[in-house]
Amino acid sequence: MPLPKVTVSPSPKGDHLLYLVPAGKALPADLPGRDFWQRLVKRKDVKPDELAKSPVAADLADGRRATLVMIDPAKPRFERLTALRKATMLLLEETPKTLDIVPLGVDDDALADALYVALVNGVPLPQQKKKMPTALKEITLPCRPAGADFSKVQALARANLLARELTALPPNQLDPLHYRQRLSALAKENGWGIEEYDFRKLKKMGAGAFCAVAQGSDGDGGGAAIVHLSWRPKKKAAKTLALVGKGICFDTGGHNLKPAKYMAGMHEDMNGSAVALSILAAAAELHLPVAIDCWLAIAKNHISPTAYAQGDIVKALDGTTIEVVHTDAEGRMVLADTLALAAQQKPALMIDFATLTGSMLSALGQRYSGVFASDDALATQAVAAGKASGERVCVFPQDADYEPALDSKVADIKQCTLEGDADHILATRFLGRFIGKTPWIHMDLSACSCSGGLGAVATDLTGFGVNWGVALLRSWAETP
């Protein structure tokens, strides 16, 4: 999906205007139509400094529509992005073709944030309707924010939209085969390396955990595969990163069939793979000084006579035997072999993304995602990246004394428990068996969807994790 065109013009020319003003007790003297805005704010019984949380919109005398929002640099970035999203959507709800962003006394960071918000919300996600929503065609700025060009903001916006677009596609349009075709096209377009481990190859390799899930689909796992994408910067990188993503294109729950209420939206269960892919895309476009391998576990979890069942014992790629306890815990199964495969290359850091557990959603709701880190320094970096990106994360424990719950009498480890207590922690302890000594962060994407939008993004699908991942890579690349 193409982004709106970004142009520079010294004077506003569009029908829709977004005014950015610095936080304060009064409106700035150089605000066009200041007396009008003062009367409006007074009529709405809003104090000027409340505009940093609750922007206002008005139809101007010349026929144009404008919103007014205050930018308070003392507030967390999440709150600033939220205010900008509210202000921007007051304009975009009229589906304009053009939008002018007018900064009055705010810094380049505020202007860049406003541009990002307009870009990610100005393009509608895929819909199957006769009449599609109108996309924003052009955004006009009076100057260039955040340096010489818009490349960073546009790269992040493109990556967020890629993650959300893929996640929004219905399961008949993004089954494993179509997904792999899309990945092959992206690799060719961007010059990435690509290697596909299909069902037959994985079976020969002994990836029994992945194949157990995929075997319920027709014909060689229904196109299931672990897809390995790679990108290397032109200048040799000092560090290599492995990104891993859960790509379950539809999750029925298998023999432990989900009720209709909980099966709805299960085409979004591939969101972790979309996030990992989009971080790769952004990092490559931004030329971050990190070599990246991206491993996507793509399959469906179907019910069929050949589907795996409770009580099955399967052997993972690294030789670990797993007792299957619940067929709806398929995400940790496909990730086990994918993590083991990625760990063979001995990356300096591994990060995996997955819509993995309902217990994380119960713990945090939809407004944060949970992370687990193999050491305190990585945990600190993860939280800092959340604050810097406006995509907030909470660190959870994964102490060893949780793991006896996964002790099995018939295999090396249980896949999960039927009780479900602390399943987000037990899932992490399970996955940790397959990474060896690799430094590791696991993100359970409870914020991948948030009703009414979250932070910068106005759609229920948030693309959460993409900006966080890029922020983390920047700080991690600079860490000795």
Image (cartoon, rainbow, N blue to C red):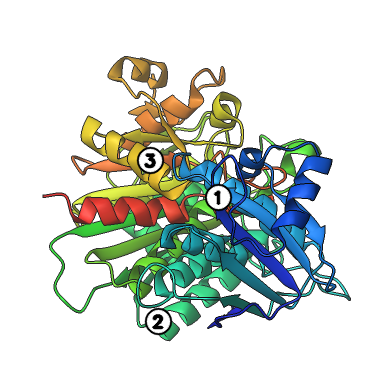
Between the residue at mark 2 and the residue at mark 1, the CA separation in whole angstroms equals: 30 Å
Q: Are marks 3 and 2 in contact (CB under 8 Å)?
A: no
Q: Earlier in the sequence, mark 3 or mark 2?
A: 2
> Can residue 127 be seen in this snapshot?
yes
* 360 left or right of 1 in image: left
Q: Are marks 3 and 1 in contact (CB under 8 Å)?
A: no
Between the residue at mark 3 and the residue at mark 2, the CA separation in whole angstroms equals: 27 Å
Give the residue displayed 81% in from the left and 70% down from the top: 128
Mark 2: amino acid? Asn
Q: Residues within 10 Å of mark 1 (few under 14, many from 20)?
A: many
Viewer-proximal residue among 409 and 228: 228
Mark 3: amino acid? His
Viewer-proximal residue among 196 and 211: 196
Q: What residue is pinned by disc 3?
A: 442
Give the residue displayed 83% in from the left and 42% down from the top: 43
Give the residue displayed 76% in from the left and 45% down from the top: 41
* 390 left or right of 378 in image: right
Q: What residue is pinned by disc 2?
A: 190
Quarter location, residue 187: bottom left
* 471 left or right of 163 in image: left
Q: Earlier in the sequence, mark 2 or mark 1?
A: 1
Q: Are marks 2 and 1 in contact (CB under 8 Å)?
A: no
Q: Residues within 10 Å of mark 3 (few under 14, many from 20)?
A: many
Mark 1: amino acid? Leu
Q: What residue is pinned by disc 1?
A: 81
> Residue 132 location in percent, x, y?
82, 74
Identify the secondary structure beneath mark 2: helix
Does 64 appear above or below 80?
below
Viewer-side label of 3, 1: 1
Identify the secondary structure beneath mark 3: strand
Quarter location, residue 377: top left
